[in-house]
Image (tube, rainbow, N blue to C red):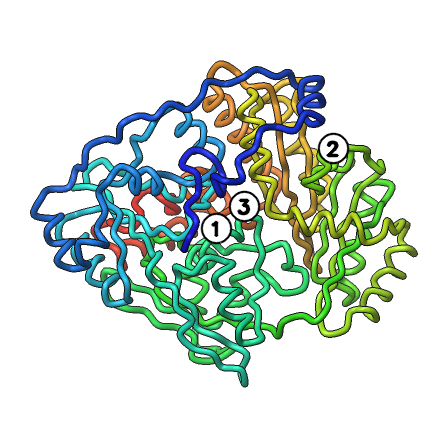
Amino acid sequence: MTTEMHPSRWGNPAETTALPESTRGLVELALGVRETPAVEEVSMPPVGLADDVLAELRALLGDDHVLTDDEHRRLRTRGKSTPDLLRARSGDLTDAPDVVARPGTHDDVVALIALAVRHHIAIVPFGGGTSVTGGLVARREGYAGVVSVDLIRMKALREVDKESMTVVLEPGLRGPEAEELLAAEGLMLGHFPQSFEFASIGGFAATRSSGQSSAGYGRFDAMVMGLTLATPQGTLEVGSSPANAAGPDLRQLVLGSEGAFGIITSVRVRVKKLPVEKVYEAWNFPSFTAGADAMRHLAQNGLMPTVLRLSDENETALNLASHSDVGGESTGGCLMIVGHEGASVAARQALVGAALEELGGTPLGEDRGAAWAEGRFHAPYLRDSLLDVGVLVETLETATFWSNRDRLYKAVTSALTEALGEKTLVLCHISHVYETGCSLYFTVAAPQADAPLEQWLAAKAKASQAMVDAGATITHHHAVGTDHKPWLAQEIGEVGVRILRAVKADLDPTDVLNPGVLIP
């Protein structure tokens, strides 16, 4: 049975915990602590869809799969960004869908889209609800209502091709569910973003997700060999071969489209054999620059491990890479996590280790690496605990070429500090590595102002503009949603915006597919 996330926090409600005393003392010293009011249960807005439309929906999907009760609507309201959580904690449920509709097949999705077009209903695809950029907040004005298209029933492993090492998965499978099905076949996908426990296969594709093991297994969009998309104009099926020269790659048009062009109903992805060995180790570098140079050397010389991550001095000082020891004793310098997975990892581990030592790294052993692996999906729970004591916490990420890394790092750090004040803590790690560049993932913490939502939106705007002004992307793996649209327009330019609008206008001329999301 699928575990539903807490409506106003991240993750499994059973794992909600208070801030540990050791961490609380550090937070109180650095940022100050004040208890925030408990979240009060508020009533949901009334269902806005007309009775005849609800009857049509029920005739299409069945009474059990058209849900209008408060609980299901609350659980499908927004995603899990800090602004989403602040709104939920304040009792703001204005973005709640009128209905949660659960199609079971591709044909159900096609029919549901057609119904939405006929009645001018905004429809929002829902996979796991882990969006952190406003991707689940459709524009409501001018529509007969909003329907959350919950893909939770579409959870099949439809095809396994062990000769080609590809499988076909349905979009509603959560990360752990997909890996469990594949493990029974001796296979794995190897896609482990921080949202892994709750995010879905369809969501991975629709947002161009990138996981913590991307150094070894690649981004999700690189795993996708083919897909099926339901649109108001019919069905698009792409991916008849591993590669082709048959014009522009339409897979790439769909990947990252965030439900604005259609609803993904299946994906064909490449898979790997289950690894026989997994080894995670920690290294220390004297500075963020030295560690980044070592990462670049590995990437440019064919020495990439499966996992490669580097914390800056601030993140290392707080032990943020170790969920169980946040605020504990630090090694100083910069912590690097290196993971090796495969049939036999000793030879690769030795080669990478020799290179890292030559480049100034100091091995710290496997215990710290294992601690990172054990807590790799738990950081968002810490954000909730910090919000509980009046600390504003959020993450943001970007990517750039190696030659621009230091400029970008300083620009974003400065923008956040200027916007949030001198007590602000800005932490950073390199989360994904390529031959030509890397992703910078920032965590920021500051004392909450009286209006924390407005406080963060102003800081996010300043940091986002700093990214674009520094020549970097507005997002490496969090996607665009509604939050990043102004800076997407700057990043891709007028012609790029016109291309996106033209595709949208042709596939979805009545603008019922996640309206207000992605398209500037």
Q: Seen in the image, is 96 located left or right of residue 478?
A: left
Residue 411, image x and y in percent? 66, 33
Q: Residues within 10 Å of mark 1 (few under 14, many from 20)?
A: many
What residue is at 80 percent from the left and 58 percent from the top?
Answer: 297
Q: What residue is disc 2 on? A: 318
- Quadrant of residue 189 in the image? bottom right
> What amino acid does circle 3 point to?
Thr
The front one of 9 and 219 is 9
Say the numbered circle drawn on residue 87: none
> What amino acid does circle 1 point to?
Phe
Q: What residue is disc 3 on? A: 475
Q: Secondary structure at mark 1?
A: loop
> What amino acid does circle 2 point to?
Leu
Q: Earlier in the sequence, mark 1 or mark 2?
A: 1
Q: Residues within 10 Å of mark 3 (few under 14, many from 20)?
A: many
Q: CA distance from mark 2 to mark 3?
A: 25 Å
Residue 490, image x and y in percent? 48, 42
Quadrant of the image containing the C terminus: top left
Q: Secondary structure at mark 2?
A: loop
What residue is at 80 percent from the left and 50 percent from the top?
Answer: 367
Residue 144, image x and y in percent? 16, 41
Question: Would you say the residues marked 1 and 3 are in contact, meaning their CB atoms lie under 8 Å apart?
Answer: no
Q: What residue is disc 1 on? A: 198
The front one of 500 and 419 is 419
Q: Earlier in the sequence, mark 2 or mark 3?
A: 2
What residue is at 57 percent from the left and 21 percent from the top?
Answer: 389
Q: Seen in the image, is 59 located left or right of residue 187?
A: left
